[in-house]
Amino acid sequence: MKILWQAFAFWFCVTVLTGFIYPAVIAAVGRAALPDKASGSLVSVDGRVVGSSLIAQPFQGPGYFWPRPLVMSNLSPTSAQLKTTIAERRKDWSARANVLPQHVPEELLTGSGSGLDPHISHEAARIQVATVAAARGFDEEKTKALLSLVDENVEGQQLHALGEARVNVLLLNLAVDKKFGTLKR
């Protein structure tokens, strides 16, 4: 009976330590050191939460920049269905952005691994400028200002070495709304 009691006491102590105390300490340190990230990197406009800078938001209006497709599939790269879907997206983007099909960036055709990537490449953002400008009725001067806004919203590589420069679509669209006015969605 004594061994059973000791085993139970050990189990209880380990459970409290690893299940409650340790997570509470880590959460407190995270909130103190990185309060924005610990809270989910929520983005607010006029005191209202509009999204998270860590998760892609669906923007389907022509006056906004679009993220990668917000889908995840388990289709193989050799899947005929996946190839058909990509070909359709390539055709749509080519027409929408008025570029040759081979110039459509790949990330606009395929979803990310998680299906939630909030970023697109600088190239993918720039290719959408003409479409966004046309939908908003911009003249040449405003279109140049929009292009400059895209360039201003480029985030560098992670840790100055990992990945490519990228643009957070939510933050870019909010910057567009702030500078040029909000469209009805």
Image (cartoon, grey):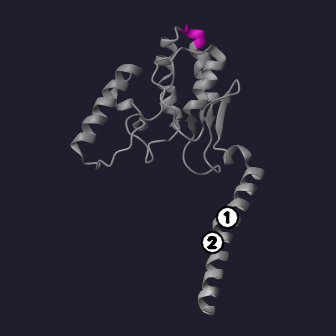
Type of residue at label 1? Phe
| Label 1 to label 2: alpha-carbon separation | 7 Å
If the image is split into quadrants, where does the N terminus sit?
bottom right
88 versus 26 height, above or below: above
Residue marked by disc 2? 15
Residue depicted at x 55% and y 9%: 138
Local crowd size for mark 1, using a 10 Å CA cut-off: few (<14), some (14–19), many (≥20): few
Front-most of residues 7 and 65: 7
Callout 2: SS:
helix
Residue 35, horizontal then vertical, whole percent: 73, 46
Indicate whether residue 139 is drawn in magenta.
yes
The quarter of the displayed image where residue 14 is located:
bottom right
> Which residue does the image show at 73% across and 61% down from the upper left?
25
Residue 174, position in %: x, y? 61, 25
Q: Do the residues bearing badges 1 and 2 touch, measured as CB atoms within 8 Å?
A: yes
- Queried whether the magenta region covers residue 152, the answer comes back as no
Q: Please tell me whether mark 1 sits on a helix, a strand or a loop.
A: helix
Residue at figure coordinates x 44%, y 42% from the top left: 115
Tell me if residue 89 comes above or below residue 11 in the rendering: above
- Above or below, 13 against 185 in this view is below
Q: Position of residue 183 (x, y in %)?
A: 55, 14
Most foreground residue, 185 or 138: 185
What residue is pinned by disc 1?
20
**In x, y percent, where is residue 57?**
51, 33
- What is the magenta range? 138-142
Of helix, strand and loop, which mostly describes the magenta segment? helix
Give the amino acid type for the residue marked by disc 2 in the picture.
Answer: Thr
